[in-house]
Amino acid sequence: MNDQRPDYFTLSGLAPQPIRVAFDAPPITADAGLLAVRVLDKSLGVRAGLAALLPDPRSRKYITHSKEALFTQAVYQIRAGAPDHNDANSLRHDPLFQILADLAPDPERLLASGSTQARFQYAFTRRQAELPPEERPVLLEVRKAQTDRLKIVNSYLVDLFIRTRRTPPVEVVLDIDATDDPTHGAQTLSGYHGYYGQHQYLPLLVYGGSSGFPLAAWLRPGTVHASLGAVEVLTTIVTALRAAWPGVRIVVRGDTGLAVPAVIDFCEGHNLSYALGYGTNAVLERATAQALADVELYYACYRHREPHVQRFEEVRGYQAGSWPHPRRVVCKVERTPQGSQRRFVVTNLTATPEGVYRGFYVQRGAVPEQPLGEMKNGLGADRLSACGFCANAFRLLVHTVAYALVVLLREAAAAVAEVATARVSTLRGRLWKVGAVVVAGARQICVRVSAGWPGQELWRRVQAAVTAFVGQVLAGGVAVAPPCGVVAI
């Protein structure tokens, strides 16, 4: 009796003829467009430069996959829309991902499995495994590797931002924000936050205001204050920026949770401009009561013409009890069909109240809100499901590095309208997710894409823009190496 199943099946009733589905085509990859990002990544040495800095306590005797290969595989999985470690168990067979990891496609030489990726995330090592945990001195090395990685990757983000600017900026806006990251298991240091009404982490992130480039990503316990660690994070970034560009003007922008005395004192003590959301109180409400009454009266008379009425005021001479001196506070007084509201901003900017609030502060709607949304919705940065806190903190940074490459791609292709302002989901659907057959030969690797794919001209334009961008960044037009000998057809 022959129990072997045929490698095809037939579907009837869908077309005039029966449809035969056969499983005999050569291996096909679904993410051939990621090669466009890998060219940028490898030419600038982003993955290799960072991986070389990461401490790795694994025993050399048991290493099969280098830390650069593991880090690269994790980053490109995230970009492909497969952010979980379990996804590696299927993608490790994909010839395209082997190319991205600088390997020739080989069905006998698989990439790392999900468990290997998880062990690397935890900085796990088998050394001294035969000893009881309390007698393993290697555990101190593991813990040091876990914490050092967080500092190293955060510092690397700032260095990468600096060395990829083609001209020194006159001004850098630092958008600093805390965001909720819901947890759904027994993650260490997650906690219930009353404001958000959920168990969560509360990461602190910093972005460059003009580009949205990520400059820092620190995971924090779920119940901390929004400003915890903000001064230390800003100190590191400001020091690096001023070391690279001594004359650069730095402006700090953040919401109400960051407007604490320590942050404001830091900005003033280091000659930084700032605009921080400020919570309301009885003193500020009394100071703006007349402005609110005027807006309410105007709205009552003219609401059929102007359903949204705004007025901007400055509260002069305001000094909170914890402040050493008065500071400037501007206010937006607004009346809408839903009711009236007042929003305050403490600042040392000299522009008009409307210029500070509408012209500068509300730009937070673009940065950091959009980058945060892209990291969560496009790259799955809120899928921190490891049990260990340091493992989740490192995982957040892997997602952040993946987003940094997205920003660099958009900057490189600024002249390509379809890419310059595209979101991650758009890039994935329009450029990255393209099926192709990978053919490995002795002299070259061919990635054969369908002649009918509508994105081929877009890819050519992006490739040309990336090559030009890399040449400018590398100062002097250093020759760009082709990506792993791959030829896209």
Image (tube, grey):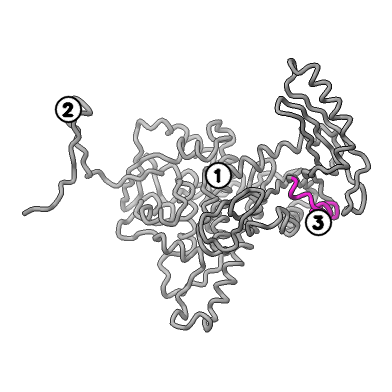
Q: Tell me: 99 left or right of 277.
A: left
Residue wearing tag 3: 262
Determine crowd level at label 3: few under 14, some 14-19, many 20+ residues with C-alpha closer than 10 A: some
Write down the region rendered in magenta: 256-269
* Circle on res. 406: 1
Locate residue 161 relative to residue 7 in the image: left or right.
Answer: right
Residue density around tag 1, few if under 14, some if 14–19, many if 20 or more, within 10 Å:
some
Say which element carries label 2.
loop
Judge whether residue 2 can be spotted in this image: yes
Q: What residue sits 18% from the left and 46% below the top?
A: 7
The amino acid marked with disc number 1 is Val
Of residues 186 and 52, the one nearer the viewer is 186
Q: Is residue 403 above or below residue 103?
A: above
Distance of label 3 from label 2 (alpha carbons): 74 Å
Q: Nearer the viewer, mark 1 or mark 2?
A: 2
Q: Amino acid at mark 3?
A: Ala
For the residues bearing labels 1 and 2, Cβ distance under 8 angstroms? no
Residue 17: image tag:
2
Side of 272 where 71 appears, left or right: left
